[in-house]
Image (tube, helix red, strand yellow):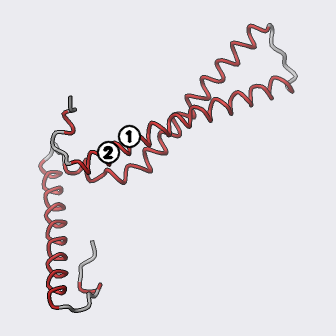
Amino acid sequence: WTPILFLNMDAETQVRLNEVRKELYFGALRGLLIGMSFSGCSFFLASKYSVIQFKSPIHRKNMFIATILVGGSIGSFCYALANGKNSSQYIGDIYKQNANPSSSYLRQLNQNESELLSDDSYERRKKILQQKQQNTKINEHDFPKP
């Protein structure tokens, strides 16, 4: 069984997308563990040295579990968000390839950008091949900036 998203992708693109997903999931798990341990330790220290004492051991146990769950969820969210933002630069081109803009203006912008990128890369490759055939030194200043 192959997800519909992977039908139009080559193997290298699928590997990149899976790597980013894996980083996102592992970041969420790391955040969960760090958030749980941090909130558990802070609850323990706060209950040990605070002036306010809990009514009963059951109340203390319930507050401890609630603190651990809330701290774990906040840590998981923050780490997943940070990893997702850091990894999104590796898969931005995948989403631009499959973009289906709703307005004609956005469609035209995407088309112009893709034509510009394809023309620049084609010209760059053409110059490199010509210079390799002539055995000349490649000069950076001959190429347009991307």
Task: Please name whichever residue, 23 or 76, is drawn nearer the observer in this view of the structure.
Answer: 23
Q: Which residue is mark 2?
A: 17
**Amino acid type assigned to the residue bearing label 2 in the image:** Leu
Task: Please name whichever residue, 106 or 94, is drawn nearer the observer in this view of the structure.
Answer: 94
- Determine the CA span between mark 1 and mark 2: 6 Å
Residue 11 position in % (x across, y down)? 23, 48
> As displayed, is residue 132 above or below residue 26?
below
- In the rendered image, which quarter contains the C terminus? bottom left
**Amino acid type assigned to the residue bearing label 1 in the image:** Arg
Question: Residue at image x 32%, y 45%?
Answer: 17
Task: Please name whichever residue, 6 or 40, is drawn nearer the observer in this view of the structure.
Answer: 6
- In the rendered image, which quarter contains the N terminus? top left
Quadrant in the picture for residue 4: top left
Q: Which residue is mark 1?
A: 21
Query: Looking at the rendered structure, which numbered label has been put on residue 46?
Result: none
Residue 68 position in % (x across, y down)? 64, 24
Question: Residue at image x 15%, y 91%?
Answer: 134
Q: Residues within 10 Å of mark 2 (few under 14, many from 20)?
A: some
Identify the element where label 2 is drawn. Answer: helix
Q: Are marks 1 and 2 in contact (CB under 8 Å)?
A: yes
